[in-house]
Image: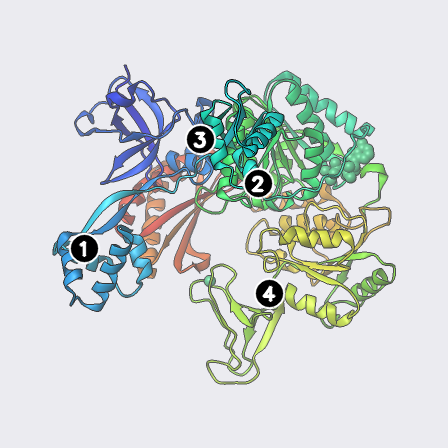
């Protein structure tokens, strides 16, 4: 009999904990279920990761009992648990938190501190004469019965403090105790009514007769449909049920997806010889039932998606499952409709655009084995399938595969690991593969497959680079001419600028003041529509001042351009033309992104201005001109991947032109016309770019020739954060002396590129090494030793493993 359970709690603690199993749940508890366990005076959710006969040595005394078993069946199977363990180890992140990342949101239960009135408090309130603040707080508690402490501090900010509440508790006026806040998402169940036969007693009223007949025709109906068709059916239904003519039960239903699809048929084409050759290689991999990694390198429009569809068909035919990862923004109706046409309802969608309930239902469809394809943004890599046969990562170079918060995983790297663990085929696809993936292919770690041409030999667009050094204004003469010509020819144009807002910042030319975010080390962006200054990193916004707030000068100027200003400029130049804009500001509402695309499709927009949102996944045959307003924005980003990112963006933007019958044209405006990122993008020459960039990486010993781990300390206090950063530096140096100096190099500590972000101060230290094992060991030691230095200072350590995954 198993007596002890090992639990990974979903809290930022690096250890797992052991608990006793009570008699009540001994029969039912299994690995992979959730439990509620006592933890530091609270109750938290944890995941059962092992069942033991005996407690591990030395901790028998302290063991507490599991509070409650939350599931009837395991949410995680052993295979997924192995995957989660790997992730926890690789990214140095607590196992419970890793599992939480992989499950749909809303499955967590955590206890909170709850306030309720003690007798003396209630009496005081009744008697009257309390201080105003106390009166308000007590009234609120009386009104709600119970209020969480957190919420109370939110309702009366600056009026009550935590210590005041505790003071009242000491006086015997309040109770504060741990309670459960139950916000858990549950399966949706609906009432179903089933026909049972017209024997024994006939129904009496006309209405009952009608309803019974209707149910009989359908066999089984949802009660909700019934009430749509009949006025107040509840009494007749009760009566029919009493007579045994119908039965009522409950059934789990799937919440409807808010993504609305317009279906267009996508007839299955005959593969081109290139596609045929590529698919044949992939089929060999699938047949082998072994880990078979491929990098499918092919320009946009070369037929990669068709290859994915065929590979999935093959895998389903073998009784296995498929995971398809796409960058968030490319989950377009076009792509969905293509999948739907091929696979019907056999796929679940997982991405952050869905509501909590929807996401939970989609996840359950996979978990229950109702569908065999999971498609979505990066988190779809956690789809709870048991027998994955293929994992596809489309646009594998896309930066959105890296999660930048909390668990900083890279979905492409996880796809590789999962494919390996599950003996599956891995398809990484891109027109501009990441340097690390192409490097892996060059070293034979990935099998390289090439689709060199667009389908039906459609030529790639002609790209021209225009130097802005001698141009005046935003738009070069060439771009203006091209736009004019497209308007006359009734063709559409896209203009790409990777910066939203009207002006990057506001400057007072008299005293030199710029407006900065108080929470982040960035300037505020000017937005014309609501005349605000906004921070693009936190929620800070203020009304734009008319005059300089420092010297009172009247000549405040907007510097640098954003999409909002570009849109205005275009409208001014071409007043008769329909101009649209697609960026974060115009797409904040749920389906607005799709509406803009629809307008483009139907010809309601002639010129679309936008940020990188316009770059991905859409296929509009009437778009024949693409203008890149400034190629320099991404080029100057302080990151060693800036050149790579620029090349990828430019190539992708260019790929939007000329998808139809008409030849496409692209103009790139830049102050760096000779830069190899721009020149190679102009020539559609990925391989050329790769060779140049890889030499640069090699010379500076950057990834993929080395591995990086960034250690970032983040805290509310500038002084304490700096002190911890300095401790980190000392610990790092002493570790080097203790045997790590041979393979590891340390840079920093120094302030992070954004020294302040969302009100928190940030310092960082970078460790570089050839061997991942050694670097990893170093990181573990460092984190462990830094722990005591951070304690009680409110400073967190954030570990970011650079996504270079060399097998
Ligand atoms: P990619 O994913 O590389 O951008 P797609 O698979 O989307 O390429 O193909 C580009 C276009 O060509 C799509 O409209 C697709 O329907 C079409 N297509 C793909 N394969 C074929 C084929 N073998 N014959 C005809 N049309 C094809
Ligand atoms: Zn800010």
Reply above or below: 462 against 504: above
Mark 1: which secondary structure? helix
Q: CB under 8 Å between callouts 1 and 4?
A: no
* Residue annotated with mark 2: 228
Mark 4: which secondary structure? loop
User: Residue 727 vs residue 412: left or right?
Assistant: left
Mark 2: which secondary structure? helix
Residue 169 quadrant: bottom left
Mark 3: which secondary structure? helix
Quadrant of the image containing the C terminus: top right
Q: How packed is label 4: few (under 14 Cα within 10 Å), some, or many (20 or more)?
A: many
State the image coordinates of residue 736 (x, y, percent, origin top left). Answer: 37, 41
- Give me the C-alpha separation between circle 1 and circle 2: 53 Å
Quadrant of the image containing the N terminus: top left
Q: Is residue 807 visible?
A: no
Reply above or below: 57 against 484: above
- Give me the C-alpha separation between circle 2 and circle 3: 46 Å
Q: Which mark sits nearer the N-terminus, 2 or 4?
A: 2
* Residue annotated with mark 4: 501
Q: CB under 8 Å between callouts 2 and 4?
A: no
| Residue 166: numbered disc | 1
Nearest to the eye among marks 2 and 3: give it. Answer: 2
Q: Which mark sits nearer the N-terminus, 1 or 4?
A: 1
* Residue annotated with mark 3: 84
Nearest to the eye among marks 2 and 4: give it. Answer: 2
């Amino acid at each position: 009999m198993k007596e002890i359970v090992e639990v990974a709690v979903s809290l930022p603690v690096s250890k797992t904990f052991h608990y006793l199993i009570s008699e009540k749940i001994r029969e039912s508890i299994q690995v992979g279920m959730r439990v509620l366990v006592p933890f530091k005076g609270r109750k938290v959710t944890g995941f059962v990761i092992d069942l033991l006969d005996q407690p591990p040595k030395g901790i028998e005394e302290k063991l507490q009992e599991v509070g409650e078993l939350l599931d009837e069946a395991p949410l995680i199977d052993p295979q997924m648990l192995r995957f989660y363990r790997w992730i926890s180890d690789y990214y140095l992140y607590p196992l419970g938190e890793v599992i939480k990342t992989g499950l749909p949101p809303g499955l967590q239960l955590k206890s909170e501190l709850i306030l309720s009135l003690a007798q003396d408090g209630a009496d005081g309130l009744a008697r009257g004469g309390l201080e105003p603040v106390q009166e308000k707080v007590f009234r609120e508690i009386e009104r709600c019965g119970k209020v969480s402490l957190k919420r109370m501090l939110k309702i009366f900010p600056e009026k009550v403090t935590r210590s005041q509440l505790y003071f009242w508790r000491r006086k015997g006026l309040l109770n504060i105790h741990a309670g459960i806040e139950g916000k858990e998402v549950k399966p949706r169940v609906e009432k179903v009514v089933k026909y049972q036969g017209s024997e024994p007693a006939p129904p009496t009223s006309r209405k009952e007769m009608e309803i019974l007949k209707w149910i009989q025709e359908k066999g089984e109906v949802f009660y909700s449909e019934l009430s749509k068709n009949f006025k107040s059916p509840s009494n007749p239904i009760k009566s029919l049920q009493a007579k045994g003519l119908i039965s009522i039960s409950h059934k789990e239903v799937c919440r409807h997806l808010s993504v609305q699809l317009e279906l267009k048929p996508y007839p299955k084409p005959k593969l081109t010889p290139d596609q045929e050759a590529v698919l044949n290689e992939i089929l060999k991999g699938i047949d082998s039932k072994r880990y078979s990694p491929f990098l499918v390198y092919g320009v946009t429009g070369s037929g990669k998606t068709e290859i994915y569809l065929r590979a999935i068909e093959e895998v389903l035919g073998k009784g296995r499952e498929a995971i398809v990862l796409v960058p968030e923004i490319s989950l377009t109706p076009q792509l969905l409709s293509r999948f739907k046409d091929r696979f019907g309802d056999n796929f679940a969608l997982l991405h952050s655009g869905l509501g909590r309930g929807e996401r939970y239902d989609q996840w359950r469809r996979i978990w229950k084995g109702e569908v065999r394809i999971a498609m979505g943004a990066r988190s779809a890599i956690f789809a709870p399938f048991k027998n994955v046969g293929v994992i596809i990562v489309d646009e594998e170079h896309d930066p959105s595969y890296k999660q930048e918060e909390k668990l900083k995983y890279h979905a492409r790297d996880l796809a590789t690991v999962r494919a390996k663990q599950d003996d599956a085929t891995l398809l990484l696809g891109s027109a501009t593969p990441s340097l690390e993936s192409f490097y892996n292919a060059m070293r034979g770690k990935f099998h390289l497959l090439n689709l060199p041409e667009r389908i039906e030999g459609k030529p790639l667009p002609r790209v021209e680079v225009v130097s802005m050094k001698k141009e005046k204004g935003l738009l070069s003469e060439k771009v203006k001419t091209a736009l004019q010509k497209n308007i006359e020819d009734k063709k559409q144009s896209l203009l790409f600028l990777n910066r939203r807002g009207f002006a990057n910042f506001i400057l007072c030319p008299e005293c030199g003041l710029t407006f900065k975010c108080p929470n982040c080390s960035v300037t505020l962006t000017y937005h014309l529509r609501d005349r605000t200054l906004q921070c693009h990193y936190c929620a800070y916004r203020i009304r734009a001042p008319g005059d300089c707030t420092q010297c009172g000068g009247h000549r405040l100027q907007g510097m640098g351009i954003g999409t909002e200003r570009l849109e205005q400029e275009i409208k001014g130049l071409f007043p008769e033309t329909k101009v649209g804009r697609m960026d974060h500001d115009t797409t904040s509402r749920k389906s607005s992104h799709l509406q803009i695309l629809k307008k483009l499709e139907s010809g309601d927009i002639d010129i679309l201005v936008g940020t990188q949102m316009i770059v991905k996944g859409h296929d509009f045959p009437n778009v024949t001109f693409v203008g890149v307003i400034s190629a320099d924005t991404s080029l100057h980003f302080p990151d060693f991947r800036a050149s790579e990112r620029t090349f990828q963006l430019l190539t992708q933007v260019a790929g939007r032109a000329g998808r139809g019958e008409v030849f496409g044209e692209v103009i790139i405006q830049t102050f760096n016309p000779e830069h190899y990122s721009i020149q190679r993008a102009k020539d559609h020459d990925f391989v050329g770019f790769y060779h140049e960039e890889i030499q640069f990486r090699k010379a500076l010993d950057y990834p993929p020739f080395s591995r990086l781990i960034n250690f970032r300390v983040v805290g509310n206090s500038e002084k304490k954060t700096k002190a911890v950063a300095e401790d980190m530096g000392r610990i790092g140096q002493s570790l080097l002396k203790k045997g790590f100096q041979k393979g590891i190099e340390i840079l920093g500590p120094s302030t992070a590129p954004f020294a302040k972000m969302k009100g928190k101060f940030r310092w960082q230290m970078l460790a570089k090494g050839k061997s991942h094992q050694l670097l990893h060991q170093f990181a573990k030691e460092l984190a462990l030793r830094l722990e005591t230095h951070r304690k009680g200072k409110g400073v967190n350590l954030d570990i970011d493993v650079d996504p270079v995954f060399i097998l």
